[in-house]
Image (tube, helix red, strand yellow):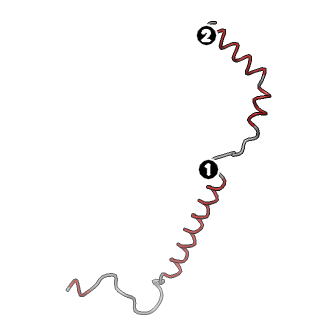
Amino acid sequence: MTTTTATAQHLRTIATTWGDLEDALGAATQAGWPPVSLRSYLAGLDQADIEEAAALRAMERSPDQIGQRPIPIRLDITD
């Protein structure tokens, strides 16, 4: 049997049994990447990062507030 004949026979077999092959595979369980569980996990991490950044921003002191603020360097080191 030559390669061309074998190829034609294989293609014919696939074409005639395509419906059975689809039934054997069943429905697709995953439609995209990343998987749903990973996608929700990553979304949770993103949300936690957003909440943490908002909490840190709330703790910062606004520069327009009146009062003494600590200087960003240690003066005893620079003397």
Q: What residue type is labelled 1?
A: Pro
Give the residue at x 62% y 47%: 33
Q: Vertical placement of 76 versus 40: above or below?
A: below
**In this orientation, which residue lies closer to the viewer: 46 or 8?**
8
Find residue 22 and report its image quarter.
Answer: top right
**In this orientation, which residue lies closer to the viewer: 74 or 29?**
29
Per the model, the C-alpha gap separating discs 1 and 2 is 40 Å
**In this orientation, which residue lies closer to the viewer: 61 or 31?**
31
Would you say the residues marked 1 and 2 are in contact, meaning their CB atoms lie under 8 Å apart? no
Give the residue at x 72% y 41%: 28
Find residue 78 and report its image quarter.
Answer: bottom left
Find residue 23 and report its image quarter.
Answer: top right
Give the residue at x 48% y 81%: 60
Considering every residue shown, the one lying at the far left of the view is 79
Q: Considering the image in quadrants, where does the N terminus appear?
A: top right
Q: Considering the image in quadrants, where does the C terminus appear?
A: bottom left
**In this orientation, which residue lies closer to the viewer: 39 or 18?**
18
Q: Where is residue 44 in the image (x, y as percent from the top left)?
A: 61, 64
Q: Mark 1 points at which residue?
A: 34
Give the residue at x 23% y 84%: 77
Q: Secondary structure beneath disc 2?
A: helix
Q: Secondary structure beneath disc 1?
A: loop
Query: Is residue 31 toward the left or the right of residue 76 in the image?
Result: right
Q: Name the residue under label 2.
A: 3
Q: Residues within 10 Å of mark 1 (few under 14, many from 20)?
A: few
Q: What residue type is labelled 2?
A: Thr
Q: Position of residue 66 (x, y in %)?
A: 46, 91
Which of the two marks, 1 or 2, is nearer to us in this view?
Answer: 2
Give the label on residue 68, or none.
none
Q: Where is residue 6 in the image (x, y as percent from the top left)?
A: 65, 12
